[in-house]
Image: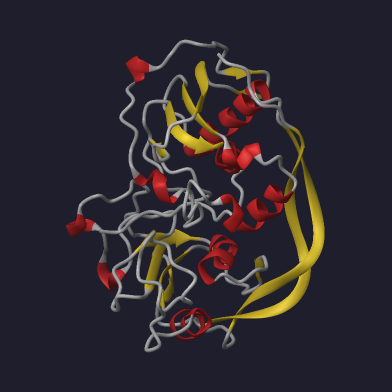
């Protein structure tokens, strides 16, 4: 069965309670929340729309000091994997930095730079947030509501900053030719963003995942390999996730010139230190391709060191919330 990533990677020093925060958001948040709408506390109330700002109708924010694993009722990463749920947002045991990343749809590149300027408690203190809204909002509308909640409860203010930094440019290895595992997404293909939970329906013809809109874990051909796949995603989304998948250390910018959306699968043998499963065998598989080899052979892509502009989110102000 495939497992949705749809998230981010936190630098090593911030991963004590998430283990592998970043196998895109959050590795521990694949467990659905069991909180029902009837259980939501009516702690605060506001109009769904105030001016041009979307807000939850009711919301509760509480610090969580338990050892429970983070969980949410849908995936909080920058991808589009999402099943409409009647306006319910429910997450528990989750670091504030995850909520910020969700609210502003941050890529892995942006998240790493964001964390450098944050107080430690933003990545270590965990919070339960339960909220609901009228109707059946989209995932992006939920993001806007979370922006309003963070501004209200955490006094969060942010600004955008574009910087010229060392990057890796994502390029085609051969002009106008992609690899065997990267293909344009067919316009007439059915494509659900609901995460497939039935192992018998986790992939479609060609070995691509059944779920669209965000990367998912795929079956591997070797015991110490990683395999990812996605359908109906842009090259920009793929590029933004590569630093995490390949442990590259630099932002990656899409300079392939490829437009539209794509389907892909990618399998490689990660370095011994780069494992997504706590307690797993971390020895490397020398028979498998390295990440860069797989990128070239399977997707027809390569990386080239350059400098380029990257847009970052900078936190100007944030406060620890008071109790509801």
Q: Is residue 241 left or right of residue 294?
A: right
Q: Is residue 170 above or below residue 45?
A: below
Task: Find residue 116 and report its horizontal and vertical position in percent.
Answer: 72, 50
The color scheme shown is: secondary structure
Q: Is residue 247 left or right of residue 30?
A: right
Of the pair 10 and 80, the residue shown nearer to us? 10
Q: Is residue 54 above or below residue 70?
A: above
How many numbered dots are placed on residues in this image? 0
Quarter of the figure that contains the C terminus: top right
Task: Find residue 131 and report its horizontal and vertical position in percent.
Answer: 47, 22
Of the pair 267 and 299, the residue shown nearer to us? 267
Residue at the left extreme, as displayed? 200
Taking the spot 40% from the left edge, 44% from the top edge, the residue there is 29
Task: Find residue 240 and report its horizontal and vertical position in percent.
Answer: 59, 62
The quadrant where residue 52 appears: top right
Taking the spot 47% from the left edge, 21% from the top edge, the residue there is 133
Taking the spot 46% from the left edge, 30% from the top edge, the residue there is 137
Whether residue 167 is visible here, answered yes or no, is yes
Taking the spot 48% from the left edge, 49% from the top edge, the residue there is 25
Q: Is residue 302 above or below residue 110?
A: below
Quarter of the figure that contains the N terminus: bottom left
Of the pair 76 and 208, the residue shown nearer to us? 76
Whether residue 187 is visible here, answered yes or no, is no
Task: Find residue 200 and report its horizontal and vertical position in percent.
Answer: 17, 58
């Amino acid at each position: 069965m495939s497992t949705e990533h749809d998230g981010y990677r936190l630098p090593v020093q911030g991963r004590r309670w998430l283990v592998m925060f970043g196998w895109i958001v959050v590795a521990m948040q694949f467990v659905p929340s069991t909180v029902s709408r009837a259980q939501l506390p009516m702690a605060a109330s506001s109009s769904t729309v105030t001016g041009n700002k979307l807000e939850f109708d009711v919301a509760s924010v509480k610090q969580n000091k338990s050892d429970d694993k983070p969980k949410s009722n849908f995936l909080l990463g920058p991808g589009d994997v999402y099943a409409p749920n009647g306006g319910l947002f429910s997450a528990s045991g989750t670091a504030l930095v995850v909520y910020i990343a969700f609210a502003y749809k941050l890529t892995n590149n942006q998240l790493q730079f964001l964390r450098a300027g944050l107080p430690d408690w933003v990545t270590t203190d965990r919070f339960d947030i339960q909220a609901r809204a009228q109707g059946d909002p989209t995932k992006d509308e939920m993001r806007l509501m979370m922006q309003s909640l963070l501004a209200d409860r955490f006094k969060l203010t942010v600004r955008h900053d574009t910087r010229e930094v060392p990057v890796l440019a994502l390029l085609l290895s051969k002009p106008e030719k992609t690899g065997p595992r990267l293909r344009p997404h067919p316009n007439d293909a059915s494509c659900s963003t609901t995460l497939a939970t039935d192992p018998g329906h986790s992939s479609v013809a060609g070995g691509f995942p059944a779920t669209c809109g965000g990367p998912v874990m795929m079956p591997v051909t070797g015991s110490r390999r990683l395999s990812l796949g996605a359908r109906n995603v842009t090259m920009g989304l793929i590029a933004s996730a590569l630093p995490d998948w390949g442990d590259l250390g630099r932002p990656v910018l899409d300079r392939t010139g490829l437009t539209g959306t794509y389907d892909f699968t990618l399998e490689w043998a990660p370095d011994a230190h780069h494992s997504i499963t706590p307690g797993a065998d971390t020895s490397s598989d020398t028979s498998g391709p390295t990440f860069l080899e797989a990128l070239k052979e399977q997707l027809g892509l390569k990386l080239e060191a350059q400098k380029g502009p990257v847009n970052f989110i900078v936190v100007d102000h944030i406060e620890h919330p008071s109790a509801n």
